Image (cartoon, rainbow, N blue to C red):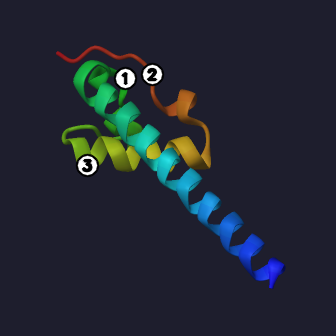
Amino acid sequence: MCLRVCNNASGQSLVWVAILGVVILYIYSLVGFAFLRDTFNPDNQVFCATLTQCFVSVIRYGLIGDYDGVCTYHTSY
């Protein structure tokens, strides 16, 4: 009986941590969309024309890795 309750509490905690992580990544993509749009480089397939594209790019490169390598400052002419 205790194993079932403890397992459920651990699972719930893990779900809440995952939700918190998604919220933090969403806030970061919101800041990136508002202020750091120049650092997203479409040549490296890191798009930030819309907030959804920024969120997907942050999720993809933030969780998979190498986010600093693909997001560099470049000037638009």
**Distance in Å between CA atoms under marks 3 and 2:** 20 Å
CB under 8 Å between discs 3 and 1: no
Q: Position of residue 64 (x, y in %)?
A: 60, 49
Please give the name of the residue rendered at 28% of the width and 14% of the height, measured from the top-left corner: 75
Please give the name of the residue rendered at 49% of the width and 33% of the height, measured from the top-left corner: 70
Please give the name of the residue rendered at 51% of the width and 44% of the height, measured from the top-left corner: 61
The residue at the far bottom in this view is: 1
The disc, 1 or 2, on the residue closer to the chain's N-terminal end is: 1
Any mark on residue 52, and which?
3
Camera-near label (3 vs 2) is: 3
Name the residue beneath numbered marker 2: 72
Camera-near label (3 vs 1) is: 3
CB under 8 Å between discs 3 and 2: no
Left or right? Give the position of 19 relative to 1. Answer: left
Secondary structure at badge 3 equals helix
Name the residue beneath numbered marker 1: 39
